[in-house]
């Protein structure tokens, strides 16, 4: 009997990307087991979604710890107890201490709403519009100590239209994120996507550029 690939999720908000992962699992597209959803906010919607789905949850408050590093180490110690094979940051709105995340490099991914390396950090939709970009997108990358700077696995793109404002662009991109993240996680769970010597590999071969995700499929 094959042991299911184990995933823990960190989220700070409503949990729409976690919901997309759950939906992909329920459709049979993501053969994984969700072993934990953890948050820095006790009222995060992602925790409610997890409880409804029967997934264990954890909420820790940063205010209960002396500093960021203390909180992050405590959080990751608790996450490790769930023995996940992969940790997915799905709207986790904190900069993580480098020492806390070091043991997870290569086993932790994040989804970010921009075409990295463009627009690391916050307000990505606003910044893309202000720059007059013709297209926008989302990236899934391996997490390192550099903010939104780890090796990019895959990206999905959308054109920016003349009627797009910040809210409309964010809504349009979110639908793309909900296809991109489960597709990448499925590739990792299947052993096709790995991180070796600081480079993303697909089927054992290093990538020269991020994979392109279209219609839920990855291509070079």
Image: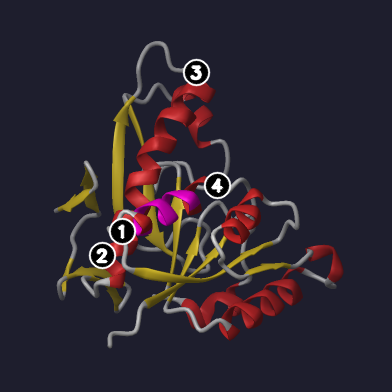
The local secondary structure at tag 3 comes to loop
Residue at x 68% of width, y 79% of height: 73
Q: Residues within 10 Å of mark 1 (few under 14, many from 20)?
A: many
N-terminal of the two: label 4 or label 3? 4
Mark 1–mark 2 CB contact (< 8 Å)? yes
Range covered by the magenta-colored residues: 19-25
Q: Which residue is mark 2?
A: 187
Residue at mark 3:
165
Q: Which residue in the protein does label 1 denote?
A: 184
Is there CB contact under 8 Å for labels 2 and 3? Answer: no
* Front-most of residues 60 and 50: 50
On residue 121, which mark appears?
Answer: 4
Of marks 4 and 1, which one's residue comes earlier in the chain? 4
The x and y percentages for residue 108 are 45, 70
Total marks drawn? Answer: 4
Q: Is residue 24 magenta?
A: yes
């Amino acid at each position: 009997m094959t042991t299911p690939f184990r995933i823990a999720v960190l989220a700070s908000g409503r949990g729409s990307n976690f919901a997309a992962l759950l939906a992909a699992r329920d459709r049979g597209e993501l053969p994984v087991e969700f072993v934990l959803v953890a948050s820095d906010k006790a009222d995060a919607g992602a925790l409610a979604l997890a409880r409804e789905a029967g997934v264990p949850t954890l909420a820790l408050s940063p205010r209960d710890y002396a500093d960021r590093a203390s909180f992050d180490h405590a959080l990751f110690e608790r996450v490790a107890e769930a023995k996940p094979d992969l940790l997915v940051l799905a709207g986790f709105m904190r900069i993580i201490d480098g020492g806390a995340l070091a043991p997870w490099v290569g086993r932790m991914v994040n989804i970010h709403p921009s075409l990295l390396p463009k627009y690391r950090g916050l307000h990505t939709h606003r910044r893309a519009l202000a720059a007059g970009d013709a297209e926008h997108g989302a990236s899934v990358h391996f997490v390192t100590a550099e903010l939104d700077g780890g090796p990019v696995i895959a990206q999905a793109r959308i054109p920016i239209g003349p009627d797009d404002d910040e809210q409309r662009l964010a809504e349009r991109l979110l639908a793309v994120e909900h296809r991109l993240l489960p597709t990448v996680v499925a590739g990792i769970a299947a052993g096709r996507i790995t991180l070796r010597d600081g480079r993303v590999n697909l089927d054992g071969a290093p990538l020269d550029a991020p994979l392109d995700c279209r219609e839920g499929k990855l291509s070079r």
